Image (cartoon, rainbow, N blue to C red):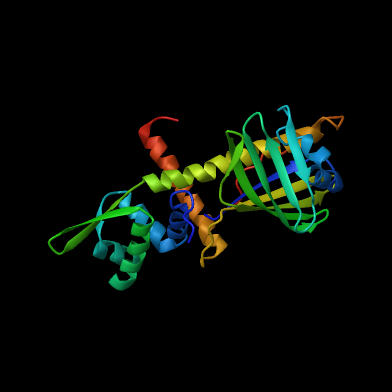
Amino acid sequence: MNALELSRLVPAPVQQVWSAWTTPAGLARWWWHTWRGVGYDVDARPGGEYCIEAAEQGIGVRGTFRVVEPPHRLVFSWIWYDLVDGRPVEQPADEVEVRFVAEDDRTRVLLRHTGPWTGPEAADDYRQGWTFVLDALTAQVAVAGRD
Amino acid sequence: MVKYFDGLDAVAAALAHPGRRQAIGLLGAGPASSSHLARALGIGLPAMHKHLGLLTGAGLIESTKVGRVVTHRLRPEPLRRYGSWLAERSAFWNAQLDALAGAFAGDRKGVGDDPEKAGVLE
């Protein structure tokens, strides 16, 4: 399929979870937070850029914000890179959408990660393609008799 | 068009159609001819050839001709690579969202606030 969708219920109000995604101090609480020396740059405005780099681990991710609707919706490009001899080797840009929905005093975080390929087919067709692949791989693994 | 990840874009497009998924499912049970697939899908041969072209372009099938009969065989490797792409991202985001929920779980006193484990929404 074209997109991956996940959700999580986070035990904090929407505004706090929004800040956790859109400020360096907020991100540092959870994004690669067990690693030392991770750098966080975030300019959470439409057209603003972000970069989160873990130099010791040799990886990073960067991109540009396309949609910033506080405190409910973020859409940004997603460019993963590996540091090879200290220089970034980038992958093609994906796109990520994150939505924050209040549920009492907690926040439902809905995340959608889209591959760079888009075709004329509807998103639902891509989603069914993903289910198909999962089922096929599960069946193969079951037949092979190993986990 | 930019080639992405060894042609995963072509695999994604090939799978984004119910008839093509049905054809792949049938070929998983063994090789089949174009006319056999067309009959199973309930479509004519011209339409079947169009789908077969997309599947071939995505590296999902191999075809051999014996006499007048063309037989198609499934190549599962692109499915595995596509599955890996999705599985890696799924694992990454599951870990990230666990960390996000965990960062706030410590803030709360009291019981019963376990962050809900997420799966892939369909």
Q: Between residue B68 and residue A52, name the one nearer to us.
A: A52
State the residue at coordinates (44%, 57%): B10
The image shows residue B42 at horizontal and vertical percentages of 33, 68
The image shows residue B30 at horizontal and vertical percentages of 27, 49
The image shows residue A101 at horizontal and vertical percentages of 78, 52
Q: Residue furthest left?
A: B67
Residue B1 appears anywhere in the view = yes
Against B64, is B43 above or below? below
Against A116, is A107 above or below? above
| Number of marks drawn | 0
Q: Quadrant of residue A138?
A: top left
Residue B112 appears anywhere in the view = no
State the residue at coordinates (37%, 62%): B54
State the residue at coordinates (29%, 62%): B37
Q: Between residue A63 and residue B109, name the one nearer to us.
A: A63
The image shows residue A73 at horizontal and vertical percentages of 76, 55
Q: Is residue B89 left or right of residue A96?
A: left
| Quarter containing the C terminus of chain A | top left
Q: Quadrant of residue A146?
A: top left
Q: Is residue B112 left or right of residue B93?
A: right
State the residue at coordinates (17%, 62%): B69
Q: Is residue B30 left or right of residue A64?
A: left
Q: Between residue A114 and residue B111, name the one nearer to us.
A: A114
Against A51, is B11 above or below? below
Q: Is residue B91 left or right of residue B18?
A: right
